[in-house]
Structure formats: C-alpha cells, structure tokens
Image (cartoon, grey):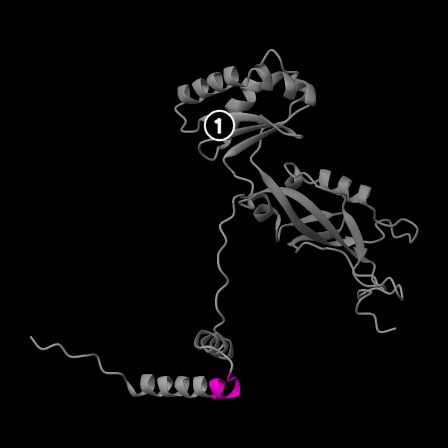
Amino acid sequence: MNSTKPTKSYTQALRQIASTSEVLKIKESFLALKANQIDWVNDIIKGNPKPKPHIQMTTKGLSRKQVIVPMSNDNNNSFIKNSAFHITNINRLLRNAKLEVAVNFIRSNPIGLVIVTNKVAIQSDLQIISQYIKKSEDINKLQVEKPRLPQSKLYLKIIGIPFFPNGKTQDRLNASDVKTILKQNQIFDDIKLTSRPRVIKVLPKSDMSIVWIDIWDYQSRSKAKCLINWCFNVGKYTITIRGANMNLGVLQCKNCWRWGHTTFSCRI
C-alpha cells in the first residue's frame, strides 16, 4: 500500500514563506536573541502572545454548597456546642423527606451559622433546616433569620424618579424617600439592600434623577433577572430598573481639587 504525504496548498506554502522571512528579519535586527526569544518576538508581532501560565490556587471563592443562617452570637455559640448532634438530626430529617442533600459539617461565622452540604441546597432543604433550627431548645427563634445560599452584591440603577418629588426645590429626593418607594412596591419584597441608595441628577439642569442601589443576590443572579428592565409606577411617573456596573466613585485630584483625573495625571 503506497502512502502519500499530504501536499500543502499554495496558501499554506505562501504563509510559511512569509513567516520564515519575518523570522529572518527579526534575527537580522536583533543579533543577540536566541531561537526561543526570536519565536517569542515573532508571536507578539503576529498578535499571538504567549499565554500566561495558569497558577493552581490553594484557595477558592465562596462555594454554593453551604447554607448561611444569620443569627445572634448567643444563638451561634449555643448551637455550635452540640454541632454533631444537630448534624445527625438534620440529616435524618432530610433523608425522611427523600432529599439528596446531606450536611457535612457546621461552622460559626460572624454573620451566624454556616452549614456545609454535599450538594447545592434547594428551597425544600432550606425549609427543613430552618424549621429544625427554630425548634431547637438552645435557640431563641426570634433572633434567627431565614437560611439562605451564599450571596454577592449586584448593582442596579433606577431611572425616572423626579429629583424634586413634590415639585419644590427644597425637597430633594433622598435615600429615605427611595427606601419608602421600594417598600411600597411588591417586586422588592424579597430584596435586601447592601447599602444606602445613592441619588444623583441626570443632568445639572434636569429635574429627573438616577438612583443607584446595591442588592444581595444569589450567584445565579436570579433576583436581578426578575428586576432588570422591570417598570413600576411612582405617582404619575413610570420608573425603569436597569443593570449597572460597580461604581468605584469619581476620581478627584488632590493637587487642583478638580474631578475627573488623579493627582498623578494632573497637568497643573
């Protein structure tokens, strides 16, 4: 059986010749470079830089295979003393409900308890865990919040609220007004703010505002997906919710004290 070598097309041969000529030009320009350094320079010229090495990290971000139960320090300390006993009881309840989640271990956290599981918990798992913790004898259930999955900050902006809600220039829209507006709308019932709302004017001569809010959301962004591009009413105005990027603030120069640039880049 005759084996024939694959023949190169005209385009492939032309590319190889062009690549060889470029390498020769680099070698003539930089006589001190070694072969591997010439290849590295050639890759940069062609727009194919060497990929950065992947470093294996020994730490990782917040895992979703855990349940956070915010509670007071007294409740936390009392519950963690009998953690092995509580793990056994919670796993028994989860098995009786024919659920696949099981508790591996429990640890304390400045917020409350962190219950580490073998899988990502769902709503039915959270309900069983919540009922057990609140019925525990060494827990004050009034100081225990609903269990939740790990959350992260998400940034939104609300467009269309008047900067002067009452039509008077002395009554500006403030953070307290925004919180009241949010409480009056059912779409924000399950939403918790991470900080005070920030209110700015759209333009110096405009009477409309942009409200920036930061909320706690799951890593799946399920809460944000329900809010973004949603509209609601404030009086006669139709308000729209948009997604936003993290705002690190406006730069201010410490040399000329003007906004928009750093001290290092100041030209005065």
Query: In the displayed structure, would residue 188 be above or below residue 113?
Result: below
Q: Residues within 10 Å of mark 1 (few under 14, many from 20)?
A: many
Seen in the picture, residue 221 relative to 260 is either above or below; the reply is above
Q: Quadrant of residue 153?
A: top right
Per the picture, the main secondary structure of the magenta-coloured stretch is: helix
Report x, y in % for residue 131: 55, 20
Tell me the quadrant of the picture where the N terminus can be found: bottom left
The magenta segment: 25-31
- In this view of the protein, which residue sits in the foreground, 63 or 166? 63
**Left or right: where 207 falls relative to 225:** right
Q: From the image, which quarter does the C terminus lie in? A: bottom right
Q: Is residue 193 left or right of residue 46?
A: right
Q: Residue at x 35, y 88 (%)?
A: 14
Question: Where 21 sits versus 108, above or below?
Answer: below
Q: Residue most toward the top? A: 137
Is residue 168 a member of the stretch shown in magenta?
A: no
Q: Nearer the viewer, residue 204 or 231?
A: 204
